[in-house]
Amino acid sequence: MPIPHPPGRGYTNVTINSPRRNHSTLLTDHVLFPTLTDSGFITEVHHVNGKGENKGVVYCEMQGRENSEGSLVDRAIMSLLYPDHIPTLSSSSSTLEQSPPPPPPLSCGYSAETGGKMANLRSLTVDKVRRYHKEYYTPDNTILIVTGNVSNTDYFMALDEVEALILKRQLEKEMTMDCGSGSSGSNGIGSNGGVGGGGLSTSSRVGRPWMNSFVPPMVSNGKVGVYPPYNHEEWSGGGSGGGNGGNVSGGSSTAQPLIIAFPSEDESRGTISIAWRGPKYSSRSAWVQLSLIWEYLTDSAASPLQLAFVENDDPLCADIGPAHDVFTEGYHQLWFQEVDVDAMEEVVPLFYEVIAKQAGLVVPTADDDMEEEEGGEGGGFDLARMDNVIRRYRRRLLEASERRPTSAIVDGIVRNFLYGPRVGEPSTIRENGSVTSAVEEMEALHLDVDILPFLDEAEGLCQDATHWQNLLKTYMLDRPMAVVFGKPSAALSKGIQDSEKEREARQGKELGEEGLERLAKILEAAMEENEHPIPGDILTSLPVPDLEKVPSIPLFTARLYPSSTELTLAIVPESTRDVGGEESEAAIARLKSDSALTAVPFHADLTNIDSAFVFAAVGIDTTPLSKEQRLYLPILNEILFKLPATLEDGSQLSKEQFVNSIHDETVSYSNGVGLLGGAIPQMSYVSAQVESNEGSGLATALRWIRRALYLTNITTDSVKTAVQRLISEISPQIRSGPTVAATVAAELNYNAETSNTLACNLFRQKPFLSNIYEAIESGNDIALQDVVEELDGIRNALFQPSNYHAFVAANLRVIPKLLDTLVESLTPDKGKIDSEGRVIDNVSASSVLRARGDGLPGGDGAVCALSAIESGFLNISAPGIKAYDENHASLLVAIEYLTALEGDFWVKLRGAGLTYSYSISESTDSQLLRFSLFKCTDIAAAFETASNIIAEYAKGNVAVSAIGLENAKSTLAYQIIRGRSSKLSAATSSFVRTFKGERMDYDRYLLSRISEVTSVDVMHALVTHLVPIFDTSSKLAIACPTNKLDQVHDYFTNRGWTNLKKVPEEKLFSAFVDTDDAETHVLPDKVPGFSMFLPGAFAAQFRCACPKCDR
């Protein structure tokens, strides 16, 4: 798996147990000595097929990304930050001499499109790739990072083997060159070395590329898109900004934004990016402080820029977010998402107004002082807020280090590798021609990996507003600023599709019939070569890990049961992992003895993990809500942690005070539909994570959950802000092919009366929110107050103990009065219990599936045209199975076998350039199976190929290989174990299983079943469960480019989907949801429930002949 780090390229190999030594040599061999064959380049990168169409895996990827909104704007901003530079020629001594030709511009790699532009990919050759690999993929330009439970002995032995491999390859190269064999081919170093006859050098010809590369100055003298340094006199002549409804005038008379158009049928909202060059790599303290400044400005609803642009009655955009990258001379930027196109000109002046106030360039007014007292942005720099930001930044850093230690350090290690000082190089610390010492090199590495000392330094500066104001001036106001406006264009979307169609037609004409036939044969030969079986000794070179030796994260769960007469608390037997019975029982006894409770109104799962943090959450059953009430869930979730509050003692917290306070005391907090990350969409949740503080942290976490549930006050202002933000976020969803395909699939599968998934999707939220927005725009205060009252009613109905199942993950041994604190916090009257608790069940997604087709002759589905995409997205769904179905393990293995790296789907779908990605997935929550295509260049051909693969297995023409079967089982086991690789993920996965009808030890049960799966079992699962996915009885959802709507629709209609809707973009909402101009629904809602599909012609031709089916 590549590590995304723009100036470099990383590859990871993750194992369970301690990695064997040959993992390192295998990874090194693959990275430094790849085959890089002609056939691999043709299929994986780019080719022209027999129809004159450009295909290839990388080409597919870029076709789906290059003209997207974010990609176009980002490429433009990077070109302004790191422009091509034309060197200046020295003047000639004689005016009569002919002027030399101008030198070529010097390009900076920081502005490059690392994925490759489509035009460049069309001219790329395998020899260019080999040459690049030879120059850059060398041992001295490579770092090997090993993390995890690895002994020193194994580590150094692995390094010895890696070094031996490199020396062996170098010797092979020299021998090959001595023999005069320099052509690339299937044998020898020409192919194995991956660089034709050149092989691999042990040292790079380019040295340290990013240390020796030219970094051009940022041009600011009148260039479009580059604003000169801020001049207060020029920019201070305007009004108050979009946040207060005024027009902002003033500003630089010469500065103009660079305007980039992106394809979109909806032309109402765009994107703005502003950016500056940042500190140099070695200025680590400045980079940390700059990150803190951006947190201060943007991290919450109470931050200065959020208040100015988003969290107000007249927002200019849906959201803002900073970004940065540390290069030799890096950059930092700010994104304004979903900006009202008519208000784009107001963004930069308002930004400068806010920053100038924070930097002390504007004298605060009386109104500013009053706003600051109320918790607003105020007129000057807020040192108390900065202190809050630094403390939270530290907490989040420490929590991330506990949860994902490798991820927490790897970026700093890679950055040091790219830019850090090396022994013998000129010292960046000492002068007088000194060179870097080994000690200095290691100290620099420590500074890149551990930023806590820089946070200590920043905390010491929290008494000095001038320091932070000078930082704002230095890195935002006193240097050139790049500004790009991304504006939507309906005409461009049609233009791109038409021009691409014309280009391919012209390309086919130029190639002629003979040329196209030749290319078709080349592609066929390349695919045949890539389909050659991988030698068995390679596939078995890595030993299968012994699952019995895989260490578990020690934990156990105690369950608190609802009761009106007694305290019932007991260990969930199957939850215990690597914890002795005496230890867990002692913890239970302590919890009981420390409690005065005699009744409990809800279930609670209390999971003990050895952590420095406390995570608390409450899962909430949404079953009591009506269809109409479910539409309000997105608004309620948007405002829940952004409201003023009235505390138990009568004191008031403003919205800004509430947000600032919760940020000051927590690591994180969240809420939403679904359960802790989206599983179980018929539930909702509220959660908070805090430092343990020797056990007192639980009270803090529950205090904030309680305030959100019971003590906040929903206001018309909060509803206005939420509705405007939510409705502005719909535009990018319409431009997203995967989102539209998934939304259509949900419409086809779920019951609109009861499904939260449907109620919260973009098709239903757009008309619902639009009605409320119209009331806001027209000043209809009565209608707005009705919304507030509806939200209050929903909150009162939902936030009742009888709907709760609480969850705590922490070191239970150190928390005082845990049970009493939990019950008091989650009951409206602080411990007063006036209702009987209940078991929350039947909340899985499968409980709200719509009834199936009742024998209709064709399947149901929709093909939707989107103007913003250039590739297609497909989502087909069919019935799945339950968690404890006897075929579940076999089905999982069959899916992994077919979709594995270099498996059938990989070779024939990706390898043929038909799609960038694919998947088959199953969910025991929804009991649905899905087949998906992502960034697909030819949906019809990709679907046809996938169904043919399934058919060949179902007919018995292709057998399941023994090696492939074992590899599939091992990979699947790794995936299951990795899902519980952190303390919190192990705890939360056990909690979520409760609502899926699974025991807490389900992963261990599944691992044992997977180990027993045979090839016969796989074939049975394939015929029984995977064949129906490709049958016309399945549910078909497709998003495709506008110019391919008819073609795709006709193909699938001819395949048998006779109830297939063809949906142009302008009918996207009316085709699925009742509106005034609605057409016929794709399917009317039928009686809730689940029934199996009746097989169509495709499924009917296959029958499993295994012993299970014969008996």
Image (cartoon, rainbow, N blue to C red):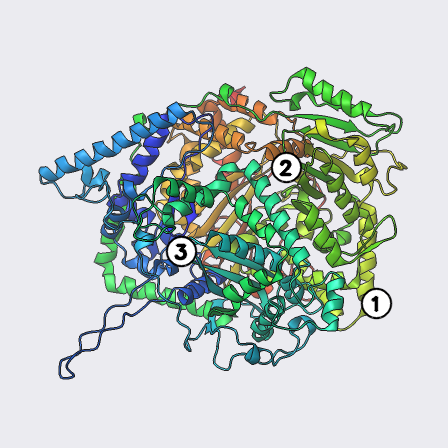
Residue type for callout 2: Asp
Q: Can residue 359 be seen at all in this image of the molecule?
A: yes
Q: Residue at x 85, y 53 (%)?
A: 651
- Circle 3 — which element? helix
> Which image quarter holds the C terminus?
top right
Checking the image for residue 782, the label placed there is 1
Residue type for callout 3: Met
Height in image: 333 above or below 87? above
- Circle 1 — which element? helix
User: Would you identify the image quadrant in which residue 109 lies?
Assistant: bottom left
Looking at the image, is mark 3 or mark 2 nearer the viewer? 3
Residue 1067: percent from left, percent from top: 59, 64
Checking the image for residue 62, the label placed there is 3
Checking the image for residue 202, the label placed there is none
Q: Can residue 842 be seen at all in this image of the molecule?
A: no
> Which image quarter holds the N terminus?
top left
User: Would you identify the image quadrant in which residue 813 lies?
Assistant: top right
Reading the image, the residue beneath label 2 is: 925
Mark 3 or 1 closer to N-term? 3
Is the Cβ of the residue at disc 3 closer than 8 Å to that at disc 1?
A: no
Q: Residue at x 51, y 57 (%)?
A: 323
- Circle 2 — which element? loop
Residue 605: percent from left, percent from top: 72, 31
